[in-house]
Image (spheres, rainbow, N blue to C red):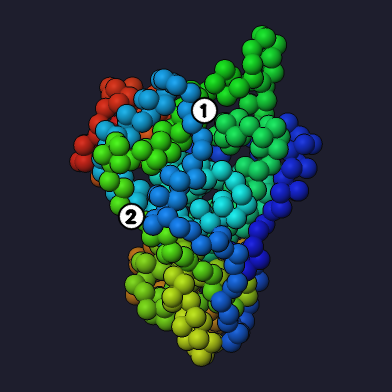
Amino acid sequence: MGPAPRFLTLAVLTSVLAGCGALMPSDTGQGTADTELGDAGPATEVVETVVAEPIAPIDLWSLIARDSTWRAPDKDPEIASARDRYLQQPQLSEVISERAEPHLQTVVAAVRARGLPIELALVPVIESMLDPWAYSSAHAAGLWQITSGTASHYGLRRTWWYDARYDVAEATEFALDYLEALNARFDGDWFLTLAAYNSGPGRVSRAITRAEENGLEATYWSLDLPRETRRYVPRLLAMAEIIRERATLGIALPSVPIDARLVPVAVAGQIEMERAAQLAGLPLEELRRLNPGQLRWATARGPDQVLWLPESLAKPFARKLAQLAPEDRVQWVRYTIEPGDTLTKISRRMGAPVTLIREINDIEGHLIRAGDSLMIPGSLQGENALALARIGPERGRRPGRYEVKSGDSLWSISRRFGLDLDALQQWNQLAPDRYLQPGQTLRLRP
């Protein structure tokens, strides 16, 4: 994410919604579950951000509980079922709280800054269990599970280096723009808005038309919607109820600090993530966890890059970065092409992807000449597996089996792999309220 705060404005999204039957290229909802090389200039700065006013509650869960106003219909079976499933997995609260600590404050602050219902901050809990690297086989990614089609349609930046869907701040601003536009389309009804976020606005509009033709009141609870969408709002309401009533229910949600704020620092050019971690005084894996949108061994190319850091580290990092020589940001190796070389051979020898070699050296096609030189990132030497490791979405073909881990639920596993929840239950002969055990093996295919 660059210093510019938002890719889309609400006005743009609203005009699009008003002018077409569906917001996205396909009417399937969010799938619930390259720039020029810029010279590494010396100027760095801490980017100013708009932050919600100081908050009185002691932690983020207390804030959400205090400001939560949505209430469920009495004795709704879907809400009761969702609540029971959550309560039957006591370790889930620890997993969610652990994932919430670096990023939930960003989401809550963005929701509050717009004056939106605080319950919207729980949408990422339902979508991804607050896993910033969540990725489904439907190509939905990040906390908010934004599909690749939606990202492409609305210009969310995605390159080999960077994907805005994983950038928590950028994805949050986009998702809230989207939700506000949907809410305007559905006359301020937030439950219909969330149904549209899940299954697509066109589908919800058609369900409303059918209900009205049958003389029914067109509310979320009366519409004929896909099963997953009928369960979507109840899951959110159940989670909000558990947070509000956690003391009564005997749930100990580990505290999530209310002042653990991340701020963006402009890096003014490309820099290796490991070098940036050293300057920030953080382990490399922690810097990656704070910046899930940065996919590779170095930040995205171009002059408008930022890294998100704890507020206490931002200014010291900016000072050290300003003193760093340009040649120390990214180290390069000059490789002389030998007779018989191909890009594939060079890629294997140097531990750099062919796509990266072509991009850096402005090579079109695969034709290279012996004697010419290529620039290869030096940090890849001898560290191919580590340097190219992507702590992000699970790519490629879905595995046939999955070993249950602590904090997993049928719901989270179905979202992670883009599976229908009912199908997952059927393949494994499990009841909907079955409690999963760590180490248990599940089938992910018929």
- The residue sitting at 59% across, 73% down in the picture is 47
Query: Could you classify mark 2 by the number of other residues whose Cα lies within 10 Å: few (under 14), some (14-19), or many (20 or more)?
Result: some
In this view, the residue in front, 5 or 253, is 253
Helix, strand or loop at mark 1? helix
Above or below 118: residue 331: below
Which kind of residue does numbered mark 1 sit on?
Thr
In this view, the residue in front, 14 or 238, is 238
Position of residue 169 in the picture relative to residue 205 (left or right): left
Residue 204 location (% of width, % of height): 63, 26
Q: Which of marks 2 and 1 is in front?
A: 2
Image disc number at residue 229 = 1
Position of residue 267 in the picture relative to residue 385 (left or right): right
Query: Could you classify mark 1 by the number of other residues whose Cα lies within 10 Å: few (under 14), some (14-19), or many (20 or more)?
Result: many
Q: For the residues marked 2 and 1, what is the alpha-carbon distance in whole angstroms?
A: 30 Å
Residue 227 visible to an observer of this rendering: yes
- The residue sitting at 64% across, 19% down in the picture is 218
> Which residue carries the number 2 mark?
255
Looking at the image, tell me whether mark 2 or mark 1 is earlier in sequence order: 1
Residue 437 location (% of width, % of height): 21, 37
The quarter holding residue 35 reads bottom right
Q: Which residue lies furthest to the top in this view?
A: 214
Residue 147 visible to an observer of this rendering: no
